[in-house]
Image (cartoon, helix red, strand yellow):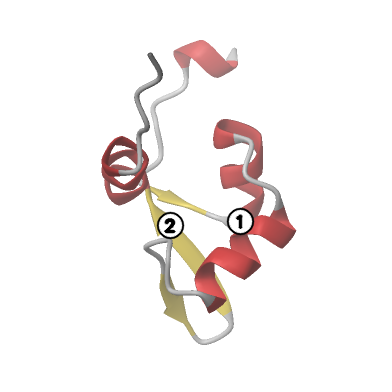
């Protein structure tokens, strides 16, 4: 099954976030430490809610002239 035909997962691992959104692991860690990116942590597992990441990206959009 190709990537385009797979159903979208709601909860993304840090690796998923790299693959789908291009946000490096080091940037993810920095953004988490600065409380700038929405995430959930259960035990030592970090997960990102796809819907909250989409909303976060839209809210941080900068228009260029």
The residue closer to the viewer here, 25 or 33, is 33
**Res. 48 mark:** 2
Q: Identify the residue at horizontal 57%, vertical 45% (top origin).
A: 17
Q: Is residue 30 above or below residue 13?
A: below
Residue 56 in percent (x, y) is at 32, 47
Is residue 35 found left or right of 3 in the rendered image?
A: left
Residue 16 in percent (x, y) is at 59, 44
Q: Is residue 65 above or below residue 12?
A: above
Q: Residue furthest front?
A: 65
Is residue 53 found left or right of 3 in the rendered image?
A: left
Decide which of tag 1 and tag 2 comes sooner along the chain. 1
Residue 63 in percent (x, y) is at 34, 24
What SS does tag 1 mark?
helix
Q: Is residue 14 above or below residue 64?
A: below
* Callout 1 crowding tier (Cα within 10 Å): few <14, some 14–19, many ≥20: some
* Callout 2 crowding tier (Cα within 10 Å): few <14, some 14–19, many ≥20: some
Q: Residue furthest bottom?
A: 43
Q: What count of labels does the image hold?
A: 2
* Quarter location, residue 2: top right
Q: Quadrant of the C terminus?
A: top left
- Dot 1 and dot 2 residues touching (CB under 8 Å): yes
Residue 51 in percent (x, y) is at 27, 44
What SS does tag 2 mark?
strand
- What's the distance in space between the residues labelled 1 and 2, CA to CA? 7 Å
The residue at which mark 1 appears reads as 14
Q: Identify the residue at horizontal 57%, vertical 18% (top origin).
A: 3
The residue closer to the viewer here, 47 or 9, is 47
**Res. 3 mark:** none
Q: Is residue 53 above or below residue 61?
A: below
């Amino acid at each position: 099954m190709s990537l385009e035909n797979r159903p979208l997962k709601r909860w993304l691992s840090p690796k998923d976030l790299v693959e789908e959104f291009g946000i490096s692991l080091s940037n993810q860690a920095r953004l988490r430490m600065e409380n700038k990116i929405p995430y959930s942590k259960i035990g030592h597992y970090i997960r990102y809610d796809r819907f909250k990441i989409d909303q976060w990206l839209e809210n941080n959009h900068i228009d260029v002239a």
